[in-house]
Amino acid sequence: MTSNIKKIGVFTSGGDSPGMNAAIRSVVRTCAYLKIECVGIYRGYQGMIEGDFKSMDARSVNNIINKGGTILKSARCDEFRTPQGRQLAYDQLVKEGIEALVVIGGNGSFAGALVFNEEFNFPVMGIPGTIDNDILGSSFTIGFDTAINTVVGVIDKIRDTASSHNRLFFVEVMGRDVGHIALNAGVGAGAEEILIPEQNLGLERLLDSLKRSKKSGKSSSIVIVAEGDRIGKNVFELKEYVEEHLPIYDVRVSVLGHMQRGGNPTCFDRVLASRMGVKAVESLLEGKSNYMVGIRDNKLILTPISEAIKAHTEIDEELIKVSDIMTT
């Protein structure tokens, strides 16, 4: 360890994801293990500006590894987008004696940390926490595995009622810019069609696919729709379009919404969060800054935050091929 850092602040920012608590726990306990003070910053950047801090030790994070959400809360903060807001945040950190930050969140949270570092040369380390799995520099983000398992569980239940009534269900899942949840959950739940932002399937192909399903003897169908799909219609308009052009189908819509963000994190997300928390603290104490901890080939890696926020991760073309074959 080459750094003289004696006190680290940890906070969660942006949309919550299952496993954030496990990451907080890991950061706090790694600090305790290495005899470093740790301060929890409540409500993200907003709490930083307002000085909403609380010292945390190993016992502060008892019994949270299994809980969804974040005990440190999260909030959007427009004030931090201004130089005056960031100055207030810096003054509060200096007053508290915090010398480095671990930020658990997504692209927006990391972009804020990057600007903060550029202005005040304040050491920051990122841990990717988002169900969308859309951050460059990591094969998995904390919360993604839990989210796709939640979605698969719900689709399994929907399939029970769909097959009982010979119905077609459009199931909308989260994924404004990327279709990782839709594609993985769709393959895992055996969906007949998957509509994602990366591919413009076209309405005609969707109708053809549904006609083929009916002709092949399928009595019910599930179509997964990512909320950012580019087919040009929202999920309710899709329902109306199919009812108009394929009256043989009895169509229903299910929008899963925020249930995808909730629930107890899976073992995978708990272990991933625990590993990333240790790596984040150790990296700060080694004098590193402006990196995000990621995982690739089951090994932890560091990616410059400036690279991580440049673009979204690409969809898995092999999985798209698998999806096409499985819907035969």
Image (tube, rainbow, N blue to C red):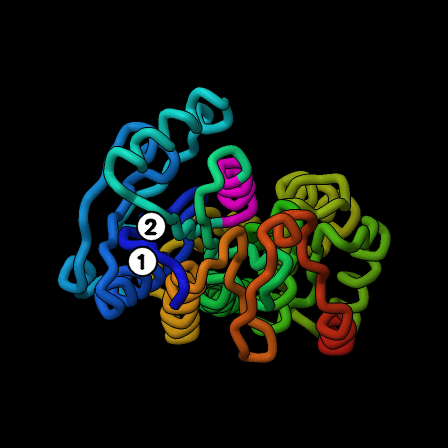
Query: Which residue is tagged 1?
Result: 24
Query: Is any atom of residue 182 visible in this view?
Result: yes
Main secondary-structure element of the magenta-colored stretch: helix
Compare residues 163 and 40 and report the one nearer the observer: 40
Q: Is residue 114 magenta?
A: yes
Q: Residue furthest top?
A: 84
Compare residues 234 and 180 and report the one nearer the observer: 180
Residue at x 77%, y 77% (from the top left corner) = 325
Query: Which residue is tagged 2?
Result: 10
Q: Is residue 107 left or right of residue 37?
A: right
Quarter of the image where one finds residue 26: bottom left
Is disc 1 surrounded by few (<14), some (14 to 19) or many (20+) residues within 10 Å? many
Q: Is residue 149 left or right of residue 55?
A: right
Q: Which residues are magenta?
A: 106-117
Q: In the rendering, at what x and y percent does residue 322 appear? A: 73, 76
Compare residues 146 and 59 and report the one nearer the observer: 59
Q: Is residue 7 left or right of residue 303?
A: left
Compare residues 188 and 177 and report the one nearer the observer: 177
Q: In the rendering, at what x and y percent does residue 84 appear? A: 44, 20
- Indicate which disc, 2 or 1, sits on the residue closer to the N terminus: 2
Q: In the rendered view, tell whether residue 91 sits above or below residue 303.
A: above
| Cβ atoms under marks 2 and 1 closer than 8 Å | yes
Q: CA distance from mark 2 to mark 1?
A: 7 Å
Query: Is any atom of residue 67 visible in this view?
Result: no
Q: Amino acid at mark 2?
A: Val
**Mark number displayed over residue 43:** none
Q: Is residue 73 left or right of residue 231?
A: left
Q: Is residue 4 magenta?
A: no
Is disc 2 surrounded by few (<14), some (14 to 19) or many (20+) residues within 10 Å? many
